Every structure is written in C-alpha cells, then in structure tokens.
Image (spheres, helix red, strand yellow):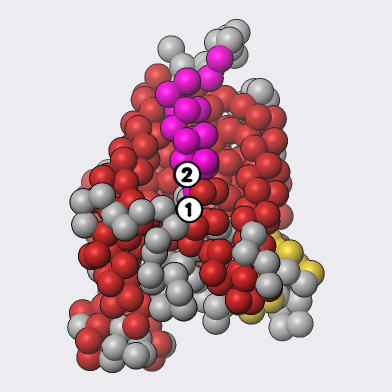
Amino acid sequence: MGKSRSLPDPIMLLSTVLLLAIGIIMVYSASAVLSFREFGDAYYYLKRQLLFAALGGVAMVVMMNVDYWVWRKYAKLALIIGFVMLLIVLVPGIGVVRGGARSWLGIASFGIQPSEFMKMCVILFLAKLLSEDNVQITNFTRGLMPPLAIVGVTFGLIMLQPDLGTGAVLVGASLLIIYTAGARIAHLVGLAMIGVVGLIGLVLAEPYRMKRITGFLDPWQDPLGVGYQAIQSLYAVGPGGLVGLGLGMSRQKYSYLPEPQTDFIFSIIGEELGFIGGTLLLALFTLLVWRGLRTAITAPDTFGSLLAVGITGMVAVQVIINIGVVIGMFPVTGITLPLISYGGSSLTLMLTSLGILLNISRYAR
C-alpha cells in the first residue's frame, strides 16, 4: 500500500459534516414537541442525538486514519460476530421489541441494532471474498453462489425479526458489490426474478405486510389504520410548497405524523424547508454518493474498490427507500434517512462506515 494523501476527499467530508449538522437541527425541530410531551424535556432527543453524533464522529475520525486494508484481516471475524448477534437478538427475553420487531439488544433506553452492524459486516466480507485472486464470479455455482448464500442467510435472519427495510438495504448494497465484481447480468436477472417471487411470498405470508401493500396502493381505503402514516406524510410535504412554512413551524409534528424524528423526518424537512430545502438535501446526498463512486473507481486495489461500492451503495439505497416511502412511492418500511434521522445504532455505524470510505479516498489514484 502506497503513502496516503495528506487529507481525505474534502468534498465527501464536507457533505458528510453538512448532512450531519442538518440532521441534528432537524431532529430537534421534529422532536421537540414529542420530547416535551413524553419526557417533559424538549431537548431529550436532541441531547441523545448529539451524544450519538459525537460517538460516531470520533469513530469516523479514527476510521479515516486507519489503513482500510487492516479490516480485510478481520472480515471473517466480523461476519461471525454479526451472525451471533443476529441469533441472540431473536431469543425472547434477550432481544428487545421496538416498533413490532425484535431487533434490539440493550438495557433500558440504550441499545444497539445488530442488523445495522451486520450490514457493514456483510459488505466488508463480500469485498474481501470477491477481491481474492481465485474468485470465479462468472461461474454460477463456484463463484456466485457462495456470496449469495451469505446474503440470503443474513436476509433470512433479519426477516425473522422482522425488518424488511434493513434487509432490503443489505440486499441492494450486496448486489451492487457482486455486480461490480463482475457477475454475469444473466445470472443476476434470473436471480432477481426468483427474488421477486420470494418477496411476493413474504408479503402474502404475513397479513400486516399485505395491509401495507394495500395501504400503499390506496391509503384512503383505511385512513386511520394502515394508510395513516402515508397520508400524514403527504399532508406534511404538500403544504411546504416552494420555501416551506419555516424552520420549527411544522404542524404535522404535533402528534399527527408518527415518528417525525426518525423514519419520516424528510416529511418535516419538506414541510418546514419546502421544495428548495428538500432539493438541497438531496443535492448533498448526490454529492456524497458521487464522491463515493469516484473513490471506488480510483481506489488502488479491488478490495478498496468493492468496499467503497458497498458503503456508497448502502447510503444510496437507504436514501432512495426512505424518501420513496415519504413521498408515497414505496410502502412503509421503517428505514431511517442516513445522517439525518434520530438514531443511535444507525447514525454511529453510518459515520463509522463513512470513515472507512474517507480512508479509501486517501489512497485514490
């Protein structure tokens, strides 16, 4: 490995810091009413978000200065730890149920979400596996099936929680890595068709998932039930207009829109900052993804390139799903908006992952 540049990609770093700063401001704006009603403290969620941002910021700086090649040695161990955590969280009495999913490990209000940790573990392991000299990715059985088996088992464990949104992000980022590594399009298209059939089966297997689909297609069919979140989200985005109602002036955060500080924070952004504010936020995400892909293209080795693709893909897929849900393009999935939504595990691990990506950018050609 050659000598690193003196600084990581400045545009990527700046866009990350700006998104984090906007997220902290919007978490306070979206959660102040809810915080005061539930805890008697309008700053409850803000203080916790600042703590998570500080922890994640420290982790990002550390990762930014540690040679990314080091993580190749620990890829298998990280994957094993991730699988163990996914199994432990399913044990009644150990795994904590929040939002209808047994997806948390922790004590009281503090906890970690193993599925968030596992996303990075799988990305790291796939980058290692598919960058080895003897990989035969164009061969279906010997090259393509091993990584797909890992992704499939991981997705299955996440679905036992159940957490379809996180599973979808994992699969999306993993497929981007596999495609970049040289997998044949015909193989991936065939598997995608099988995946669609499997997804339909998952939807039909659980009545609540079927309700989400029908609620997505026609939320007004059950406006106080399964269609409630989608309708209230559009009620927030719509009145925002071009410039918004003004920072802190949201009406929907007054107990109308559920979880305004997490899954639906973009609704509040649209309501308070309008089309212009939402567009500027998307521009920052686009900038971050562009620099991530540029890092992947200019990385000095295959491992770094695939790792950069995976991290960038994770960000992009999560943004697309979250905003797609908010504006009614996708069914409600429970996915946070990277760097913007309130959350401990998601924010800390996202900043850690971006620290690795920034380190890769220091070696870019």
Q: Amino acid at mark 1?
A: Met
> Depth check: 7 or 206 in front?
7
Is residue 211 in view?
no
Q: Residue at x 72, y 83 (%)?
A: 92
Query: Badge 1: few (under 14), some or many (20 or more) residues near its Cα, within 10 Å?
Result: many
Q: Quadrant of the C terminus?
A: top left
Relative vertical location of residue 76 with respect to residue 83 in this rendering, above or below: above
* Residue 136 in the figure: left or right of residue 194: right
* Residue 281 in view in this figure: yes
What secondary structure prevails in the magenta region?
Answer: helix
Residue drawn at x 62%, y 55% is 46
In percent of width and height, residue 364 lies at: 46, 17
Q: Are marks 2 and 1 in contact (CB under 8 Å)?
A: yes
- 340 and 313: which is toward the camera: 340
Q: What residue appears at the point 61 percent right and 69 percent down from the top-left corner?
A: 35
- Residue that label 1 marks: 26
Q: Is residue 330 left or right of residue 34?
A: left
Other residues around mark 2 within 10 Å, as few (<14) / some (14–19) / many (≥20): some
Q: What is the magenta range?
A: 7-23
